[in-house]
Each structure stands twice: as C-alpha cells, then as structure tokens.
Image: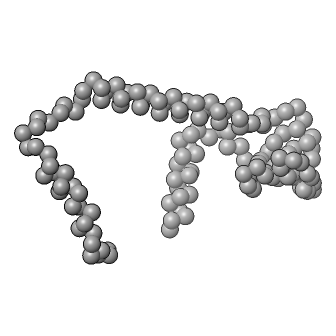
Amino acid sequence: MRFYPFSFLTLLPQYAVAEARPSSAAPSALFTSDYLVQVIGSFALVIFLLVLVLFLVKRFTTVSPKTSGSIQVLSSVALGQKERVVLLQVGVEQVLVGVTPGAIGLLHTLSEPVNITDDEDKTFSDMWSDAISRQRSAKK
C-alpha cells in the first residue's frame, strides 16, 4: 500500500460542506414519491433496454439448423469475430470449409469420418456441472 503525502487534501471539501450545513435541518424522508417514481422509472428503462438488446441479438444472429436435407452441420468453431471453420456432412462424405463474410472455401475433404458426440441429450445441469469441473481442473 502506497502512502500519498497530500491525500488528506481530498477530505477537506467534505469537512467544509459538513460544517456549512445547519445542524437543525430535519433529515428528508428517503422514500418520497418523487424518489420512488425515479427508481421505478429507471428500473423499467433498464428492463426495456435488456429486452431490446435480447430482441436485436436474436434478430441479427443467424443460427443455422443442424439438419437441412442431405447437408448436416456437424461442428462449427469461431476463429474470429466473423470467421468460422465448419465441418459438414454431405451424404457420406465429410467436408471442412472456411466461412468468412465474403466467401466460403473448401479447406479439406476428410477421408475418414469424424465421430461427433451428441451433446443434445444432455440437460443444462449436466453441461453446467461439466463446465464447473473443467474450470476447477484448469485451476489445479
């Protein structure tokens, strides 16, 4: 902890204000109607902004369905904000493609299929406990 020699000067304005107040003034009530309207209005505004942000996120993020005819998205990994590597199952063949905002390019055609475990059967509590256990093991 560092000691600043002139740090006590920051406290001087508080003492000056405290001495300037008359001691006979009655304390104001904390929960006046104006105060409650302001707090409830602020709370409603924050809730409205949260709902608006959730709506915009849902509207502008495109979630591709896992299955679409004979093409299935097996796995997808984000490499940047707009770049992804996607593993596709096309018929019996698996294809690794790179996806950017301007193009989609073939990276590799897999000779042996990759087995993907289905996490869809897991409940949220199972996924949560897995994440917590991985976090604890990473700290050790």
Question: Quick check: 20 left or right of 52?
Answer: left
Badge count? 0
Give how far across and how far down residue 22 sits, in percent: 10, 43
The quadrant where residue 28 appears: top left
For residue 98, above or below residue 7: above
Q: Position of residue 39 (x, y in %)?
A: 35, 31
The foreground one among 138 and 79 is 79
The residue lying toward the viewer, choosing from 116 and 19, is 19
Q: Residue furthest front?
A: 20
Q: Relative to 105, does residue 50 appear above or below in the rendering?
A: above
Query: Does residue 113 appear anywhere in the picture?
Result: no
Q: Is residue 104 left or right of residue 115?
A: right
Q: Among all residues in the image, which is located at the extreme left?
A: 24
Q: Position of residue 94 (x, y in %)?
A: 89, 49
Colour scheme in use: one colour
Residue at screen point 65% across, 33% down: 56
Name the residue: 92% across, 47% down: 93
Q: Write down the quadrant of residue 52 in the picture.
A: top right
Residue 26 location in percent, x, y? 11, 35
In which quadrant is the N terminus drawn?
bottom left
In this view, 77 is above or below 3: above
Task: Give whichever of 110, 10 is nearer the camera.
Answer: 10
Residue in view at x 13 percent, y 52 percent: 19
Q: Is residue 136 visible?
A: yes
Q: Residue at x 30, y 74 (%)?
A: 4
Q: Could you say which is closer to the camera, residue 70 or residue 28?
A: 28
